Amino acid sequence: MNNASERRDAMVERARKTGYVPSKIVEDEFGVDSSTIRRDLARLEAEGLIIRTQGGFLPVERKENHTYPYGPRRLVRPSVKNHLGEYAANLVEEGQTVMIDGGSTMWHVANHLKSTRNLTVITNDLQIGLLLCEWTNINLHVTGGAQVDGLYTLAGPATVEFVDRIHVDVAFLGAEAVEAELGLSDVNVLEVPVKQAMIRAADCAVLVADSSKFGKRSFAKVCGVEELTQIVTDGQVTPEQRGAFGRKLEIVNVNCE
């Protein structure tokens, strides 16, 4: 394929069909060098057709039944997620019991808990469990359940049963989509009952999500905005969105990517 426009169209279509696409694959498939693919990706991103990550790219819009692999999700807006995670972790007080949902933003929340003393942390994310397991300030519990395809998240009846038996001071939740009227929604129906159980188990339910998730609806509703105690995001949410979420919205001023 020699036509640059046709090549870029094919790259967008591949992302729509498969989700994350490593740059190396398209370099080999189209027989072009890495600098050409970088220029293609820069143009496609500027046109709002793909999301660039380290080593590859993602579709802007996903199919309802498609979940991004964990690794690529960690590479999308990492600086923003890191700042959101730091802000959220600072809401936790010494001696509290904390629930942490699965996902890339939640990993950053967990990573900033290392300086808070005497914590009990419950998570259904295997990567977060691996991160926290050697920290002496944290009493770690990992829920049971089955691994969600493509992720390190545990879900299913065993996970819900585990969460329903406990009480926590704070639950941190991730999101696929956040919209004022519908509330929080998710692409994977398996995770919805787990998130709902986390909300029931917590005195405070805190949503931590970057601004790209706002103004969107996903496949399965998790909860309404009224069920959340606080919503933490970055400064790229629109003025309309800020007004719709009211006082629950906490804006973290970071250099957004």
Image: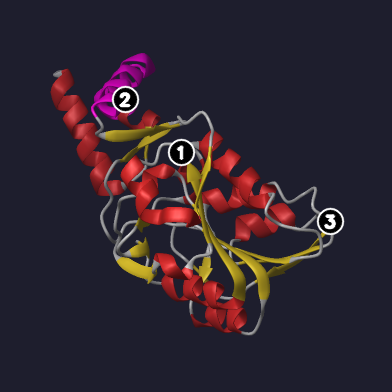
- Residues 147 and 120: in front is 120
Q: Secondary structure under badge 3?
A: loop
Disc number lying in front (1 or 3): 3
Residue 76 marker: 1
Q: Earlier in the sequence, mark 2 or mark 3?
A: 2
- Residue to which mark 2 is pinned: 41
Q: Name the main secondary structure of what is drawn in magenta.
A: helix
- Residues 251 and 210: in front is 251
Q: Residue at x 35, y 40 (%)?
A: 238
* Observer able to see residue 67: no
Asked if residue 71 is positioned above or below residue 161 in the image, the reply reads above
Q: Picture quarter containing residue 226? A: bottom left
Q: Quadrant of the C terminus?
A: top left
* Observer able to see residue 48: yes
- Residue to which mark 3 is pinned: 117
Q: Which residues are magenta?
A: 27-47
Q: CA distance from mark 2 to mark 3?
A: 44 Å
Q: Position of residue 131 (x, y in %)?
A: 70, 52
Q: Secondary structure under badge 2?
A: helix
Q: Earlier in the sequence, mark 1 or mark 3?
A: 1
Structural crowding at the residue carrying mark 3, measured as other residues with C-alpha within 10 Å and reported as few (<14), some (14–19) or many (≥20): some
Q: Residue at x 59, y 39 (%)?
A: 83
Q: Position of residue 46 (x, y in %)?
A: 28, 24
Q: Earlier in the sequence, mark 2 or mark 1?
A: 2
Disc number lying in front (2 or 3): 3
